[in-house]
Amino acid sequence: MSEEVRALQKDAQISAQKARLMANAIRGIGVDRALAVLALSPKKSARLFEKVLKSAVANAEQNNGLDVDALFVSTVKVDEGATLKRYRPKGMGRMRQRFRRRSHITVAVAERG
């Protein structure tokens, strides 16, 4: 297999658990098909993955001179980022802790063959 070219987005405002659902949908398929799957999905994570995937394709074409038509999504990784802790008022003067979860999205593409 040829070299992998990757793109990374840090601190995306989505939980890793929700983002991994979309990561499993595009792993191992061609770039054109993956972009079609992401364009038709209503999920927030699809917009985030679309940006990162387009960036990885641009990196492969511009920096490494790879053929865009022969690229496929070789690796998709979603790691947990920093969690912001916020508070909401609840009944009887109490507070409830809310977690604003973030994640790091990595997408790598490679040439088939």
Image (spheres, rainbow, N blue to C red):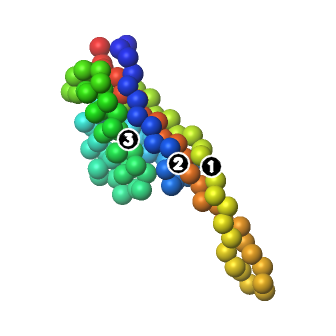
Q: Earlier in the sequence, mark 2 or mark 1?
A: 2
**Residue drawn where x is 29% and y is 24% of the image:** 63
**Residue drawn where x is 25% and y is 27% of the image:** 61
- Label 1 packing within 10 angstroms: few (<14), some (14-19), many (20+): few
Q: Nearer the viewer, residue 63 or 4?
A: 63
**Residue drawn where x is 57% and y is 40% of the image:** 79
User: Residue 29 at what x, y percent from top left?
Assistant: 34, 31
Which residue bears the numbered disc 3?
52
- Label 2 packing within 10 angstroms: few (<14), some (14-19), many (20+): some
Q: Residue furthest front?
A: 63
Three-letter amino acid code at disc 3? Answer: Val
User: Residue 106 at what x, y percent from top left?
Assistant: 46, 36
Which residue bears the numbered disc 1?
82
Which residue bears the numbered disc 2?
11
Q: Are marks 2 and 1 in contact (CB under 8 Å)?
A: yes
User: Residue 52 at what x, y percent from top left?
Assistant: 38, 41
Three-letter amino acid code at disc 1? Answer: Ala
Q: Is residue 19 above or below residue 75?
A: below
